[in-house]
Amino acid sequence: MSFDDTERLSNAIRFLAIDAIVRAGEGHQGVPLGMAEIATALFTRHMKFNPADPQWPDRDRFVLSNGHGSMLLYALLHLTGYANFGIEQIRTFREMGSHCEGHPEFDTASGIEVTTGPLGQGIANAFGMAVAEAYLNAKFGAGIVDHYTYAFVGDGCLQEGVGQEMISLAGHLKLGKLILCWDDNRITDDGSTELSISENVSERFRVAGWHVIEVDGHDLAAVSDALAQAKADPRPSMLACRTTIARGIARLQGQRGGHSGRLFDKDADAARNAMNWPHAPFEIPDDVLHAWREAGRRSEEEYRAWRERVASLSAQARAEFDRIQAGELPDGWRQTLQAYKRDAATRDEAPGGIMISAEINDLLANVLPERMVGCADLEAPTSHKRSLRAFTAEDRGGAYVHCGVREHVMGAMANGMAAHGGVIPLTVTYLAFSDYERPAMRMAALMGLPVKFVFSHDSIGVGKNGPTHQPVEILASLRAMPNMHVFRPADAVEAAECWVLAYERTNGPSTMVFARQALPLVRTTHDDDNRSARGGYVLAEAQGGARRVTLVATGSEVAPALAAREQLQASGIATAVVSMPCCELFDEQDAAYRSDVLGANTVRVVVEAAVRFGWERYVGERGGFVGMKGFGASGPADALYEHFGITPRHIVEEVKRHL
Amino acid sequence: MSFDDTERLSNAIRFLAIDAIVRAGEGHQGVPLGMAEIATALFTRHMKFNPADPQWPDRDRFVLSNGHGSMLLYALLHLTGYANFGIEQIRTFREMGSHCEGHPEFDTASGIEVTTGPLGQGIANAFGMAVAEAYLNAKFGAGIVDHYTYAFVGDGCLQEGVGQEMISLAGHLKLGKLILCWDDNRITDDGSTELSISENVSERFRVAGWHVIEVDGHDLAAVSDALAQAKADPRPSMLACRTTIARGIARLQGQRGGHSGRLFDKDADAARNAMNWPHAPFEIPDDVLHAWREAGRRSEEEYRAWRERVASLSAQARAEFDRIQAGELPDGWRQTLQAYKRDAATRDEAPGGIMISAEINDLLANVLPERMVGCADLEAPTSHKRSLRAFTAEDRGGAYVHCGVREHVMGAMANGMAAHGGVIPLTVTYLAFSDYERPAMRMAALMGLPVKFVFSHDSIGVGKNGPTHQPVEILASLRAMPNMHVFRPADAVEAAECWVLAYERTNGPSTMVFARQALPLVRTTHDDDNRSARGGYVLAEAQGGARRVTLVATGSEVAPALAAREQLQASGIATAVVSMPCCELFDEQDAAYRSDVLGANTVRVVVEAAVRFGWERYVGERGGFVGMKGFGASGPADALYEHFGITPRHIVEEVKRHL
């Protein structure tokens, strides 16, 4: 770029941020004012990006992990020429309907790679993007996939456990194309960072195997040099950028109030004088804007060359690359699962629930090579590795990431992979530990990312490990989450159906919940249709007269519900069993279907080895419930089912109480 | 202790573990076999404890953070003579009703300091215990409170983010009496730790300001010397104990299967031969048992001296110490809140919800000096510091812990404080970030610890910060948790009532949820009774005839429900408003009360700026709901309430749809 008055480039960021925050009456100026030079160095001298094609698959990724500093990102997108970030968007920062929302919201078509705000997750998303890049690079070659992932990060992100998990794991995996710029401003919301941290953050990164460069964050040339070094180093890099928070606002800079203390017109006026910026609010002088737009075109040649390389791929490679970039599934995967389902219906043995899921996914290992699986140190009991190789520092072609006992970064990694594209991420751990991963699951639901969160050991069926390891409230807590589909299949046939639904879902995450214990078959005749697709269905209709009782069950409780039905039928009580592998899909059905399935004017009893919370919408105020009233206990699984009263006998008794 | 054949002491632990695990058919032998010498060194030479008084307030605390190794703890409790751990308990390891549960379950009367299993939380609990000790030491003097907190910890605990948060914060706070023994066996469930970690763990601790000693974990004398050094050092200490997992089981030791690979009789036989242990299963030779029992009496003199020192305290100091140890509240606190409530009912201004909570708690700062408050870097927007001083490395008398942006360790710290006793812990952050703290909240609920989890910014009322910061599903997800009371008061009067209920609750945690925005008064006349105590109550009865409509609302939505009632009454529709600050307490009321409040045969509409999930138990299948259908958005709070249809007008429309 020919424009060398870099101070004015950085100040353009500053004044867009100041003007937008003054106008909105609130916002976080600390980051955009403190990191303006760092951002200028990155976007004018290093980033590979194309505002005319924000979703260019091989663009460098940029994550603002300190997402409260959103105006930094919006200013960059405006200045470099992203279509959806015209000046009218900047003017409406934080208003309803503006692209300039309080925190950046995932929208790759507009230039926002990921939603950030909940601290620590952004850098963990960036880590996931870097993993995806390395995997795709190994798969398609450096001519097609070869980009960096940059993340800006504040003190909060590095204090959060998920940030620490990321540091450890990214160092271990030697993700050399992951580059963080730490806004080392020594201020958090409470004041000096000395209130809550004493350690040398750079040393902490070095211990984990990172390449660390300490640099003056307001020295654009020095930052640019450091970025060049970072790009050349085979280790992940962290630029410790010493900065002054809210630099340019004399009243607040370097102080606690710099973070988000309210800005007034007089602060903006004073800053204009001090920085010699004689332009009206939201006005960027032509030469500065021109220079920024030129920066926005800095990768045009790379872009053209990349397109030519893609065009010259073999037809097959090209088709495969286009397919996975589009998130489309290949021919054949559905048939694979359909064949599994057909066989399962007549199978003699009843494998453990989680083993069924592992079997199914192993069948897809070659059919869906874009699948990547992360697991939190439970390879053997969850079994989803099977024929996959490990993704390691030496082998980027492996699709199985040993995440260690780090559930939160695992989930956030998966979100980063899904946001990156070209990869379908699964994560696997015990359902009891989903709470550790939950902040990432929430973000997947909010962003609408098609991550598959797989869990085993889904109830008191865990047995002797006791209540810490026995989920009782977790199904309800996940069903409460908007845009999350929670699947709890009853047997291998339903599992195949539910996995089809999960892979078909592209606008949100799926939670796949499996028992540890064996799931005996409840679907013994093959049906070409995917009966789970409507969420709930009549598995066994009442016989010998009009239905009087409807048992609604999920997962491992469908089999005891069927056994209870036998007993009830034998005593002349016409009883149906409804299997409900996915409440969210059932709730989407029309009222007539729902009423038919649940049985108008029948006694309804729900059976699930979990708490009742949330089930009242099907059983009403007067319906019955067989399940858990509180936490579990340590003992053999069968003894626990008896102890907590979740057996065919108890179901029959509950029905009779309500008849 | 006079017995110097320490190998047999350690092997007594080993064989109790082996025999119990073989008999149970499952269990985790890795820890008890790998840490037997470390445990022997600690319990026979260093620990201050008294099996005859397991709850001795000044005992050293011992936390088995790698809780899956539970047989190590049970063996120690048996050998040192805890009454509830007779050999018949060891024999029934993992059976229903045994004290020897799969994972240790909180039971200080029996000798178990805290429930462990979910990794990382145990050392964070231990950190909380050390904070409580330092605080009480400053308050009552070293003659009354002066003990160490020891924790055994595995690789998983140190990989977890919460463990990393703890390392950082404990180093910062220089908690010199916190001592970890790391079982450095280089094996996790998946196999070699090299699969998922490369960093030098000792160095990571040193960076955070810890005193680290590397030692052979099977050299009892060396471990004992290291413990002596650790106790003398003013920094928190970590003993990096190099060990062999499952040492003594030739087939598995040092290998992946050592963790929890199944043990058989023949393994036990081989171990008996190899270790020259010619005793029957569950049989400890007299001389060894005698020596262990002697170790169990090693602190008798210290115990007597401590009791004398307590007895010689001034009557006032003695009474205060006994009171807070018993978890009893002092005279006066209730009157303080009653006076606040009386004043609040006639107050002109309407403060922000969270500011009301802050006011109330500030009134208790002197009345309840055993309160400690942790906050995750949101001091200003949550305001619960006020007159409290910070707890720092230099000032142990401060009661406010700046936790940094580390919600998970904050919650686990609070659990450790509550388990320790003598301290009433509160934690404060935004409700949207409760997900980060949730794994600890679950443990508080499971253990029945009276922690107060305080949250602000409880809905779309947060406004412009957007959906990442706006809880919508979180109220439901917390209400789904057994033994958790969730309070969402409507105004300052209800807030005072709910805080009374939270402080009165001793057998479980309370979640206190407050709006960021102003809460206008809905209770304008004083009532001596605590109306919130029944969870829900008729705030405004229908007028002009029999009640036709019942509006049920919580928190900031009670005021719009009242406004809607005005409109409905004006159109001749007799409408009541029920305020429901705590569903769990309401659910405990008898059926007649609940029916009276909810209004049999009335149209019921729930109003809450959150998802509907869980509310159907009050509105039934046909009831109405005014609230959120999905995640929020970025915009001014008023605009969001209008956009999402949560206004008096929308409530009236919803009622009319259901009439």
Image (tube, coloured by chain):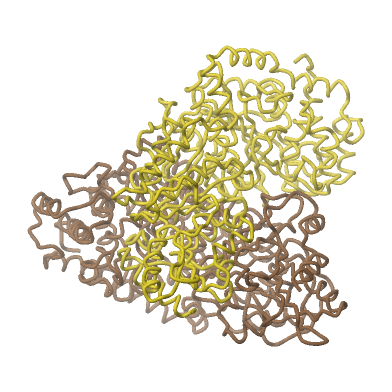
Chain colours: A brown, B yellow
Relative height, residue B163 to residue B467 (above, below): above
Which quadrant would residue B540 be assigned to in this image?
bottom left
Q: Quick check: A155 left or right of B94? A: left
Residue B386 on image: x %, y %: 35, 37
Query: In the image shown, does A538 or B512 lie closer to the viewer?
Result: B512
Q: Is residue A231 something that shows in the picture?
A: no
In this view, which residue lies farthest toward the front?
B544
Relative height, residue A171 to residue A550 (above, below): above
Query: In the image shown, does B123 or A220 lie closer to the viewer?
Result: B123
Which quadrant would residue B615 be assigned to in this image?
bottom right
Residue B610 on image: x %, y %: 46, 64
Residue B428 on image: x %, y %: 44, 45
Quadrant for the N terminus of chain B in the image: top right
Residue A62 on image: x %, y %: 36, 62
Q: Quick check: A489 left or right of B527? A: right
Residue at (40, 67) in percent of width and height: B632
Relative height, residue B522 to residue A297 (above, below): above
Residue at (81, 72) in percent of width and height: A564
Residue at (33, 69) in percent of width and height: A111
